[in-house]
Amino acid sequence: MLIRNATREDIPAAGAVAAAAYIDDEQDAFMFPGRLKYPERYLKTKESIVRHGMDDPTATVIVVVLEEGDEGWGGKPDIVGFCIWFREDGDDKSDKTEVVEKKALLSRIKSFMTDSEIYQYTSDLLDPLVSAQNASIMARTCRLPSSDNYFCPRIDDLPQYGIMDIAVDPAFQGRGIARMLVEWGINKAKEEGVPIELSATPAGSGLYAKLGFERLVFGGGGRGWRGMMGRVDGIS
């Protein structure tokens, strides 16, 4: 199998991988209760996530494709997994004179989660894929003071890498594809000497732990771990 940067021609295939991988995911079931009834809309939503990752100047979309001789090879290099890595520059800029008109994905996620825009985005009553009620619940949850601890304050202001989305075709899971995608980012972070912070599902936390990630435990009222994991390489 080969890992490479994605091209725009890969968007439909990567979106299809994401739709297949997350169709039974609990979070997607909550956010997109109409996904089974409207599979084409669900697929377009996943394609849109990949497209936004490719359009974002702070993100890199990578894919794993089959090579001749691989199990499952059907005569062409099908995409069997993808990952959207992003780099957050942090607040401590080394070159204050350079004006960069871009805001990293993680920063926008934080602003997005604490803004009423999240409700407007997911509660579009014209879209049968989403649920206005569930979007409202998520918006209220993200505004709770305890949600501030979702992001690790220890490395929050440092440059860091993170994963926006990762998916492996269900037919090819268990073959090391997710490991390939994560190790790509680990190697990039090592080269640049910056940490990695990411959100782990129960299914993915085992792999991350094997690759050296640790749970980020937050204080304050016994709130504990919220699914965040971090890895620090070369950080003093």
Image (tube, rainbow, N blue to C red):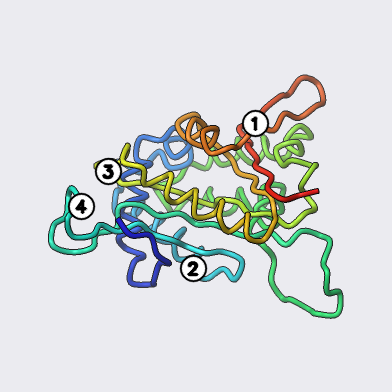
Question: Percent x, y for residue 155?
Answer: 77, 46
Q: Position of residue 183 (x, y in %)?
A: 49, 49
Q: Secondary structure at mark 2?
A: helix
> Which numbered disc covers residue 70?
4
Front: mark 1 or 2: 1
Q: Is residue 78 left or right of residue 63?
A: left
Q: Nearer the viewer, residue 14 or 148?
A: 14
The amino acid sitting under disc 4 is: Asp
Q: Label 1 sits on what residue type?
A: Arg
- Residues packed near mark 3 inside 10 Å, few (<14), some (14 to 19) or many (20 plus): some
- The residue carrying mark 3 is 172
Image point (63%, 54%), residue name: 190
**Residue linked to disc 2:** 54
Which-is-in-front pick, marks 2 and 3? 3
Q: Position of residue 199 (x, y in %)?
A: 59, 40
x and y, in percent, of residue 232 in the image = 69, 45
Give the structural element (helix, strand or loop) at label 1.
strand
Q: Label 4 near label 2: C-beta < 8 Å?
A: no
